[in-house]
Image (spheres, rainbow, N blue to C red):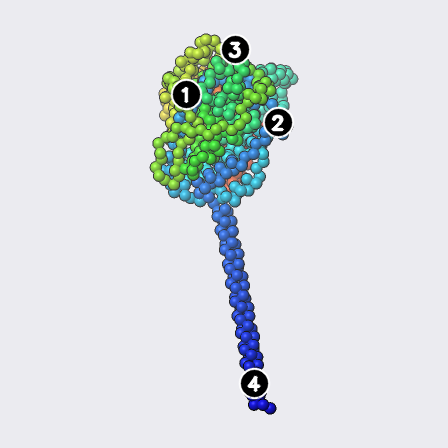
Amino acid sequence: MDPTIQQLLAELDQEKRRRLAAEADARSERTLRGEEQQRREEEQQRREEAERLREEEQQRREEAEVLASSSKSSTLSLFLHACHELLVVIQIVRDPTRTTQGAVTRPTNRRVPSHITLWKTFPEEQMKTWHRLNQHSHFLTKEIFPSLHQLDYVRQRLSPISSEWDLRYFERETVENHVKAIIDRIYENDELKRAFGLRGSITFESHVNLGLSTRADDLNSSDQQMSVEPMIETESSTEKRMSDKNKTKKKMTTTITRGQPDQFCIYRQDDNEPIPALAIEYKAPHKLTQDEIKDGLIQDIRPAKDVIDKDLDTPDFYSKRLVAAVITQLFSYMTAKGVRYGYVCTGEAFIFLRILDDPSSVMCSFCTPSTDVKAINDGSLHLTAVAQVLAFTLRAIVSPPVTQEWHDAVAELDIWPVEYSDILEQTPPIARKKHASPLYRGRRPAKLPPLQMTLRSRCRPHTDIIPRSRTPSPSMSPSPSPLSPSAHRGRIVNAPTDSSSNPDPKSGKKGQSSTDSNANWIDHAAEPKIKSRPYCSQKCLLALRDDGPLDISCPNYLTHLKGRIQPAEFRALIREQLSKDRGPDANCRPLYKKGSCGAAFKIHLFSHGYTLLAKGVERNNSHKLEHENEVYHRLHDIQGNYIPVCLGIVVLDSKYPYYYDEGVYTHMLLLSWAGKPISEFMQLNTSTCVIEMTSQSLQAIHLAGVLHHDVEPRNILWNE
């Protein structure tokens, strides 16, 4: 073969081998690159999986932290903020087909104030509470309040408001329970308890429940039995009792409408005295709107001149009349119960009330927490509903109790005789204020020191109101001379006369009295002296009854040395004292214990130093007290040993009865203090002795010819 051809073939073969080698190298490179890409992809997948696992773990940790945070107790500021969020979610049903209908209120035959005045100092007075709390910064930072998780559960249970019953539940869950929780924590803190002068905590209840009802028509025949009855009762006495019952029912017809507010705040002191401190009236927000309240309280109201017997066809008048009626309703309840503080609540708005030492005037302040807090920062927590009610309640529970002079003045107030059942139906729909009020700003008091909670004041403005002169309210002097009741006590108001524009100086107060005893924050109301006075011993009162020698072991022995006294004179002096001694430190006070037909009082005869118990009844139950007195007389020989010493009945001066818990007490049975309920002494080491002594007492009563018809632990007392 030609050498040239051979050389070409060799070169071709060599080129082919090089090409095959290059292709093999390329394939190998591609394989390596593929393997490297696969390794990179697998590594990326591993990194992504690890990142996903880290993110899931982070999410689990964050969820756990959120759950732990929401489940742990809150500080006061966090708690108030969360409580306010509950109010923000309020849902109001305004569709007439889905809401309760009827009038807002029926103020027929209710005590009506002469003046409804704007409470211009309300923001500053509320702020005093927060000033005090800010002085105890450690309390504000403690995690001692319900958790956010608990409040979220409350939120889930809230329903739209279409009636007063819905509103009652809403307020209990969103305001009242939380106010009680805060006051409970304050009471548990010794330093704060002293700062606020607290002697107990509170409960919110739909009744005062200080005892059984005092009204005859609320009792069945068995309830009206005396606790002790003669074993033999003659037919004539039975007929007389039945006749008296019939007369009592007729006497129950009164010119004043009885009733009670929807809710009470009860101050339960350490000594087990449940005292009504605050009255609350609910009004469904579709029946009383924010604008109606705002326009109704644009200025002071004189019901006799501005509302009663007036029939103006203007939206402002309709609002004023609605507001005056609602305030009158609550005012009448408050004066009957002897309560100074109260508020009307619609869920959206609050009307806070305070009755002065002169009860002819009531001061009012209108607040809308959701609007007040919405436009300002977290320093506005004191303007939330819970915070406003908290500060108001703390003031109410330490305010001084009303006096008998105060009740005497209440008895002179006018009566609103207007039938109000169809006011809403008579009001043209276009005249009603149905939309939320615009944002308003009020005067702000001086700034607080820069502590944990920065607080600023906010309430409705009063700058458009021309300041009026103020006449100082006469202070309720402890002098025995009471306010003289008018001869036209409880007169009916008809059309106002020209003289109504110039009210009586005694009752025509404008705004807050400069001498009102509760005008500013009070440390706490001083306990009346009679509360701490010891009761006279059984032997001491037996000596008074029988003209025997004085008991030197009586804690009041030295005061009895002023001179001896006979039972008849003793009762006469008690009667005279009760008619004159009606001021703030009077020598008679209720013990906040009631039975089926009476209430217990503690009385101290100042002139001779005797301190004892009295069972008071209203006039319609006087026959029961007389019968009980007869039973005590029959048990004369065992008094002071097995039963209390009885010193007879005092019939109070008809002009000066004793007012207590809506009752007008006219008769009092004077008794020695018999001790405390046996339930407090029924421990294992004493129960045998208590049972034995109880059996001996009942046997002695039966041997004297009297059968006890109500042998219950509540009616058996133990006196060590």
Give the residue at x 57% y 84%.
13
Front-most of 616 and 230? Answer: 616
| Mark 3 or mark 2, earlier in chain | 2
Give the answer, above or below, for where 576 lies relative to 198: above
For disc 2, the marked residue is 96
Q: Which mark is residue 8?
A: 4
Q: Tell me how far mark 1 sits from mark 3, CA to CA.
A: 28 Å
Earlier sequence position, callout 2 versus callout 4: 4
| Labels 1, 3: front one | 1
Query: Type of residue at label 2?
Result: Pro
How busy is the neighbourhood of tag 2: few (under 14 within 10 Å), some, or many (20 plus)? few
Residue 329 relative to residue 232: left or right: left
Task: Tell me the CA gap for discs 3 and 2.
Answer: 34 Å
Regarding mark 3 in the picture, which secondary structure is present there? Answer: loop
Is 407 placed left or right of 168 in the picture?
Answer: left
Residue carrying label 3:
494
Residue on which disc 1 sits: 465
> Nearer the observer, disc 3 or disc 2?
2
Amino acid at dot 1: Ile
Gap in Å between the C-alphas at discs 2 and 4? 110 Å
Q: Position of residue 41 (x, y in %)?
A: 54, 65
Answer with the quarter of the image where residue 475 lies. top left
Q: Is residue 401 above or below residue 412?
A: below
